[in-house]
Image (spheres, grey):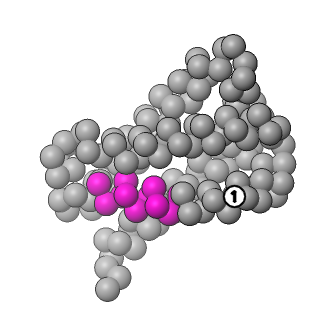
Amino acid sequence: MFSEKMGLTLLFSLLVWLGATLFFVFFGPLVLVSPYRQHFLPPFLLLEVATGVVLYVVFVLFRRLDPSPYAAVRLGVVGSAVGLILDTFVIWNKGVFFAGLSDEQLLAFVIWMAFAYGLYLLLPMLTGKKGTSI
């Protein structure tokens, strides 16, 4: 059964994925550095901190629209699943979506992505019981 809450969760999931993907389509060549460079860690951490802040804001907005228990956890799980499935096709078709990225930048994107999905899953659980503190 498809509920209104699940529809909202899927909509937010798609918007988060689309926002992140479009950010890297347009700004990836500027913000992604080769993981083989000596100074990869500072820009990587800066991207992840920014990602965490954006995700936190998304969770706050989502909880205002869906105050039900575990709403944020549901968004984290569903959003990660939706994003990972869609990112599979995006990376598979990197020439279409990320034509402006070198292979090293694409690897940096995948590294960012793996960490970001970890944040997507953990942030709702770290911010309060039953998602009520978000």
Residue 128 visible, this angle: yes
Bounds of the magenta span? 73-83
Instruction: Examine the image and state in which quarter residue 90 appears.
Output: bottom right
**Residue 98 at x, y percent in the picture:** 78, 49
**Which residue is at 37% across, 54% downward?**
76
- Residue wearing tag 1: 90
Q: In the displayed structure, does residue 130 sit left or right of residue 99?
A: left
Query: Mark 1: few, some, or many residues within 10 Å (few <14, many ≥20)?
Result: some
**Residue 125 at x, y percent in the picture:** 26, 45
Residue type highlighted by circle 1 = Val
Q: Is the magenta stretch mostly helix, strand or loop?
A: helix
**Direction front: furthest residue:** 36
Q: Is mark 1 on a helix, strand or loop?
A: helix
Is residue 74 rendered magenta in the image? yes
* Front-most of residues 57 and 38: 38
Is residue 51 rendered magenta in the image? no
**Residue 106 at x, y percent in the picture:** 73, 41
Does 99 appear above or below 79?
A: above
